[in-house]
Amino acid sequence: MTATAPSGESLWSRCGGCAALLYRKRLRRNLDVCPECGLHTRLAAPERVSQLVDPGSFRPLPDRAVEVDPIGFVDVLPYPHRLAAARADTGLAEAVLCGTATIGGSRCALAVMDFRFLGGSLGCAVGELITRTAEQALELDIALVLVTASGGARMQEGALSLMQMATVSQAMAALREVGLLTVSVLTDPTYGGVAASFATSADLVLAESGTRMGFAGPRVIRQVTGRTLPEGFQTAEFLLRHGQIDMVVPRHALRARLATLLAATRRRATNRPGATAPLPEAARPMPASRTPARDAWETVRLARHPGRPTTLDYLETTFDGFTELHGDRLGGDCPAVVGGVARLDGRHLMVIGHQKGHTTAELAARNFGMATPAGHRKALRLMRLAARLGLPVVTLVDTPGADPGVEAEEHGQAAAIAENILTLSVLPTPVVTVVTGEGGSGGALALAVADRVLMLQHAVYSVISPEGCAAILWPGRTAAPQAARALRLTAPDLCRLGVVDEVVPEPDGSAADDPEATARAVRQALLANLLPLLDVPTVTLVQRRRRRFRRFGAARAGARAGAR
Ligand SMILES: [Zn+2]
């Protein structure tokens, strides 16, 4: 609702959320977010573009919108009349505004939908324009950013509208094939055919605060199911919790967040798959720390110490500029696995790790670092994304094991772990793993099939927990210390077995006593191991990784004798 000055100029508007009467200029200065209640009002596409891109950088795509009324559709009004009215109301030729621009200095192709134009519906012209924008991204070797706002496919163009879901998708697939980033920014509302195609098939899916997104709208779902919908159904927070999106971003932070993500994934010649840098010497394995080995059981207790730095601690200290990405896109966001883009000594990479916590409450909230199938699938999504974009992967392993619950089994825990192991074994980008605490069984290996596997001095890495082993092979659980010794699970032991390449020394006492020094040691070890891998052609890298894991098939007496 608007209040109009005698001149006809609208000076005030009433907030649709809290009914506050707002001075129009003040609202505009606040990016059309109500300063009273935070309601994000819907934006026209030109407004959205000016909020998102670097000033003066937007270059519209040549406006060659196709004129269509392919099925001669008439309801109470002929379709061409509705089109003409929408054009007059919005000043736009169609429900999307397309072009190229820079965001934080990174060039991208950009398509912004406008809900005012026939509900942002996806018809032939909209599909064509978004497809051309994607093709422009391909031609210019730049990322594609889509801002969606749509009720779905445009009924007035019949099945040809439905086909636009496939038309745009195949253009996005072409970007995926060559490793160009696609980002969608969901805005309120995004439904139907747009939600079920390019809005959610992008590499990264951000939702503006206040967005609702879904395949079917709430009214339809209520009609079909006869059920009352839960509070917050299909809201951005709901989508985040259910693993559908990477993050919820308030409007005032969108430009900066996009700038960070575009910069992190900008094409770099050295990172491109198939780069043919000269083959360097294979990285030399470094000798294990000279510090005298502790008793294995004592090491197990140090590895589990709640004071040890967690993955999020390392992301704060060892790395810079971490932007967390969430969700497996299949229904869950596991809190026991965190991942996202970050920098190490100025280089962009993907970091994925198990997250425990320091307090009982933190540990419980993070499921004690035990990943669910959703956690493994989130990690898988991020690994694959990193490979496509030419980002190296660093994984930090600290888990008692994968989640052993009923629900985990129902959702295919075994297959989720298996898929990660297989995918990592041939992932076409450098992978370095650090076992920072507990390397528990298959749950650990699901993040640890790497070119270089490093291990903190007092970390452990084992096929089963000492307690579990004792319970099966000894008369009782009290034999855990004996089992710990027998399992050869300490860093020096695993170095001798060739499972681990390098031991990262811990400060006096242990990592828990000096997290800063530990962070520095991890950083140094990561750089020493990662940098030589960056110049290795991807094909060679994968061949070497496969050989690395092939040789464990031949572990025989030699290794066993060495371990004794
Ligand atoms: Zn308000």
Image (cartoon, rainbow, N blue to C red):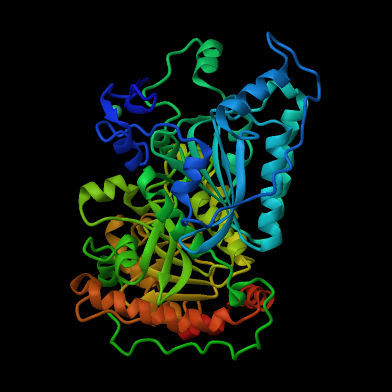
Task: Examine the rendered structure and indicate whether residue 470 appears above or below residue 371.
Answer: below
- Residue 37 image point, x, y percent: 27, 31
Residue occupying the point 62% across, 41% down: 198
Question: In which quadrant of the rendered image does the C terminus lie?
Answer: bottom left
Q: Residue furthest front?
A: 7
Residue at figure coordinates x 66%, y 43% from the top left: 130
- Quarter residue 192 falls in: top right
Q: Residue at x 25, y 66 (%)?
A: 308
Residue at 55% over, 34% down: 114
Query: Residue 362, image x and y in percent?
Result: 25, 50
Is residue 151 visible in the rendered image? The answer is no
Is residue 437 in view? yes
Nearer-the-camera pick, 341 or 289:
341
The x, y position of residue 174, in whole percent, is 72, 54
From the viewer's perspective, tell me whether residue 172 is left or right of residue 339. Answer: right
Decide which of 176, 293 is in the foreground and name it. Answer: 176
Tell me where residue 172 appears, x and y as whole percent.
Answer: 67, 49
Kindly indicate the quadrant of the structure image that contains residue 154: top right
Q: How many marks?
A: 0
Residue 34 sits in which quadrant? top left
- Vertically, is 529 above or below 299? below
Which quarter is ligand 1 in?
A: top left
Which of the image's four quarters has the N terminus?
Answer: top left
Left or right position of 354 against 545:
left
Frontmost residue, 434 versus 84? 84
